[in-house]
Amino acid sequence: MSARDTILNRLRERADGPLTAPESDFAVVTHRGWNAEERLARFVQLITSVHGEVIHTAPEEWTDALAKVLAEKGVKRLALGREHPVAAEARRALADAEVELVDVDRDIEEWQREQFESVDAGLSSTRGAIAETGSLWLWPTSDEPRLISLVPPIHIAVLDADAIEDTFYDVLECHGWASGMPTNALLISGPSKTADIEQTLAYGVHGPRELVVLVRHDGPEPGDER
């Protein structure tokens, strides 16, 4: 008899009766009870603690904030989509800027070398964020493929503050993943980081070395008592 069969037989012959599945209790993964300001503050605290950069901006001024980030970081070539409202609005705002806009809605073979060698930053929308872990969540599409958030040295993500949920479970529930799970979803909790055998932490080895989150909202910044 194999070791596997031995283990299974022991489970079947339990003296205290058959194994039963515990009753579902999702209270441990949801119902944090945070309000919108608390969710935003927690998200900012956690993502900045791992070297993420957060810039608060009014919804109607976010492209000005984007242009400022591009100038400060010396971005000359920006990869972005076309159809998503974030990409479309960015394209209009940067039409006369000294930044080359790189189309990403192409077959990977057409611009593989270009994206790895000459793109300075990638701009993407987000579907929301998770306050409990300080994570962004994205659903890549053909218009905004996942590579624009994984390959360029700088990833710039646009987040609406009212799209921050308490927990990952709340994201699954609120957006109906059980009935329509995405073929690919990204959870991003900071810039790319890794460590060697001596535990020396390095950023940008396997992905973006910088993550900049433009958070659009009308309220005060977390910690602003005015």
Image (cartoon, rainbow, N blue to C red):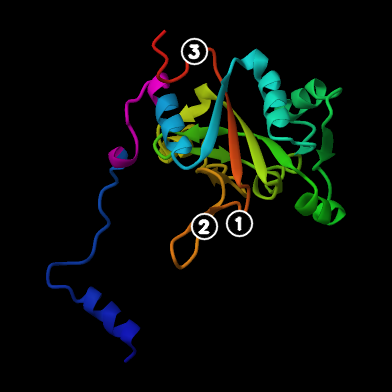
Which mark is on residue 205?
A: 1
Q: Quadrant of the C terminus?
A: top left
Q: Is residue 134 visible?
A: no
Which amino acid type corresponds to the residue marked 3 in the rendered image?
Gly
Badge 3 marks a residue whose secondary structure is loop
State the residue position of label 2. Answer: 194
Which amino acid type corresponds to the residue marked 1 in the rendered image?
Val
Residue 67: image x %, image y %?
72, 24
Which mark is on residue 113?
A: none
Residue at far left of view: 15
Residue 165: image x %, image y %?
45, 30
Front residue (pair 117, 143): 117
Report how far apart the C-alphas of labels 2 and 1 lie in the structure: 7 Å
Report how far apart the C-alphas of labels 2 and 3 lie in the structure: 35 Å
Q: Earlier in the sequence, mark 2 or mark 1?
A: 2
Residue 58: image x %, image y %?
60, 15
Badge 1 marks a residue whose secondary structure is loop
**Magenta residues, start to end:** 27-38
Which mark is on residue 219?
A: 3
Q: Are marks 2 and 1 in contact (CB under 8 Å)?
A: yes
Magenta span includes 52:
no
Front residue (pair 103, 192): 192
Q: Quadrant of the N terminus?
A: bottom left
Residue 197: image x %, image y %?
46, 68
